[in-house]
């Protein structure tokens, strides 16, 4: 299993676009500088009125499939 650490600052308006299907994935950089793309819907538990903000750990299984996400 592998994991990456990311920091996000997505406004509520930007997340609504993701939620409505304008985009299905989020593209960002990890703390180590690697590019990563992941499904936007995994952020749903962390959405507030202000959007999604904070640092997160995303864990993947041996086949690089999403396993879980947690906020730091």
Image (cartoon, rainbow, N blue to C red):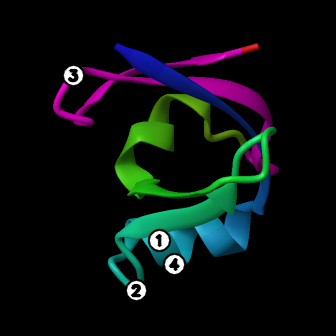
Q: Residue furthest left?
A: 63
Label 3–label 1 contact, CB within 8 A:
no
Secondary structure of the residue carrying tag 3 is: loop
Label 1–label 2 contact, CB within 8 A:
yes
> Dot 1 corresponds to which residue?
18
In the picture, which quadrant includes the C terminus? Answer: top right
> Dot 3 corresponds to which residue?
62
**Foreground: 11 or 42?**
42
Mark positioned earlier in the residue sequence (3 or 4): 4
Relative horizontal placement of residue 24, taking residue 46 as reference (left or right): left
Q: CA distance from mark 3 to mark 2?
A: 30 Å
> Dot 4 corresponds to which residue?
17
In the picture, which quadrant includes the N terminus? Answer: top left
Relative horizontal placement of residue 24, taking residue 37 as reference (left or right): left
Instruction: Verify whether residue 56 appears in magenta.
Output: yes
Secondary structure of the residue carrying tag 4 is: helix
Q: CA distance from mark 3 to mark 1?
A: 27 Å
Secondary structure of the residue carrying tag 2 is: loop
Q: Which mark is residue 27?
A: none
Secondary structure of the residue carrying tag 1 is: helix
Q: CA distance from mark 2 to mark 4?
A: 5 Å
Q: Residues within 10 Å of mark 1 (few under 14, many from 20)?
A: some
Label 1–label 4 contact, CB within 8 A:
yes
Residue at the image position 74 percent from the left and 47 percent from the top: 49
Residue at the image position 82 percent from the left and 50 percent from the top: 50
Q: Which mark is residue 22?
A: 2
Mark positioned earlier in the residue sequence (2 or 4): 4
Q: Residues within 10 Å of mark 3 (few under 14, many from 20)?
A: few
The magenta-colored residue range is 49-71
Q: CA distance from mark 1 to mark 4?
A: 4 Å
Label 2–label 4 contact, CB within 8 A:
yes
Residue at the image position 41 percent from the left and 79 percent from the top: 23
């Amino acid at each position: 299993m592998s994991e990456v650490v990311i920091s996000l600052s997505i406004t509520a308006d930007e997340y609504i676009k993701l939620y409505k299907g304008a985009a299905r994935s989020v593209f960002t950089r990890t703390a180590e500088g690697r590019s990563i793309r992941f499904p936007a819907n995994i952020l749903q538990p962390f959405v507030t009125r202000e959007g999604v903000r904070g640092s997160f750990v995303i864990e993947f299984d041996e086949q690089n499939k999403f396993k879980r996400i947690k906020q730091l």
